[in-house]
Structures are given as structure tokens and as C-alpha cells.
Image: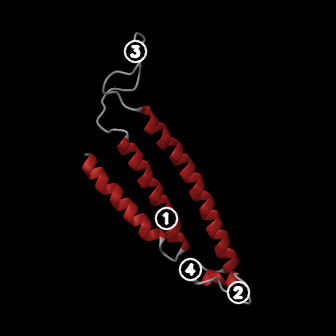
Amino acid sequence: MEVALAGLIAAFFAVSLYLLLSRAVVRMLLGVVVLSNAVNLLIFTAGRLTAEIPPIIPGSQYVPIEGAANPLPQALILTAIVIGFALFAFLLVLGYRAYQELDADNTDTMRLAEPTDAPRPPLSY
């Protein structure tokens, strides 16, 4: 199961990289969402998948039972989902506002916001 999820994670990372390198702002936003899902799946896979015992410590012991699920990756993923959703909502509003102001979705045409008489950036150092 871990091998299949490793392939899925690699595919998610590849798709997110492809979308992030696009010139369209909407594709970039979708790339951020796919990247956050890939990282969440990676953390979940790293925390073991085959545990059948819930992470409850019996009253007579001080450590969890052998083979119990690790609750830390699950808590990290729940927090990351909330933060990722908030980040996506913020970026969506930011992209929509940029589209309203500049009337463009392509990042090459968004360069119109830069002053025309500004000096060009250096091409080498």
C-alpha cells in the first residue's frame, strides 16, 4: 500500500509543479492546492498506514500498546488542512482582486502594473 501511495504522492507533486509553473493565475492556485494535498498525503503515509489499534493508553500502562496508530501525523494533517484551506481562500481573493484591477489572468500581461520608465533588472551579477 505504501508503494502505491508513494506513486500517487509523486504524481501529485509532478502535477502541482506543472501547474505552479503555468502563466495563468488560476492554474497556479490549483497547483498550490494539489501541492498541499501531496504534502498531507506524504505526512500521513510517513506515520504508518497499517495500524489496527486506536492510540489509547490503558490505565495500567504509561505507553501505547505495540502497533497502535500514531496520532501525531493525524493531528498535523488536520491542522494543515485548515491552514491550507485558509491559504487557498486568501490566494483566491488575491487572484480575483488582481484580475479585477489588471483585467488579466496571464502573468505576462500583469506586467502592465510596472512603470514603463523603470530600469530593467540586471540580467547577471
- Mark 2 and mark 3: Cα distance apart in space: 69 Å
Residue hosting label 3? 58
- Mark 3 and mark 4: Cα distance apart in space: 58 Å
Q: Nearer the viewer, mark 2 or mark 1?
A: 2
The answer to which of marks 4 and 1 sits earlier in the sequence is 1
Residue lying at the far front in this picture: please name it. Answer: 125
- Mark 2 and mark 1: Cα distance apart in space: 33 Å
Q: What residue type is labelled 3?
A: Pro
Q: Residue 109, located in which quarter of the rendered image?
A: bottom right
Residue in the foreground of this view, choosing between 46 and 92: 46
- Mark 4 and mark 1: Cα distance apart in space: 15 Å
Is mark 2 in CB contact (under 8 Å) with mark 1?
A: no
Q: Is residue 91 left or right of residue 68?
A: right
Q: Which of marks 2 and 4 is in front?
A: 2
Q: How crowded is mark 3: few (under 14 residues within 10 Å), some or many (20 or more)?
A: few
Q: Which amino acid does label 1 sit on?
A: Leu
**Judging from the image, what secondary structure is the residue with disc 2 in?**
loop
Residue hosting label 2? 119
Q: Which residue is at a point 51% across and 69% down the rendered structure image?
A: 28
Q: How crowded is mark 4: few (under 14 residues within 10 Å), some or many (20 or more)?
A: some
Residue in the foreground of this view, choosing between 77 and 120: 120
Q: 33 above or below 118?
A: above
Q: How crowded is mark 1: few (under 14 residues within 10 Å), some or many (20 or more)?
A: some
Residue hosting label 1? 30
The answer to which of marks 2 and 3 sits earlier in the sequence is 3
Q: 51 above or below 56?
A: below
Q: What x and y, as percent, mark residue 122? A: 62, 83
Q: What residue type is labelled 2?
A: Pro
Is mark 3 in CB contact (under 8 Å) with mark 4?
A: no
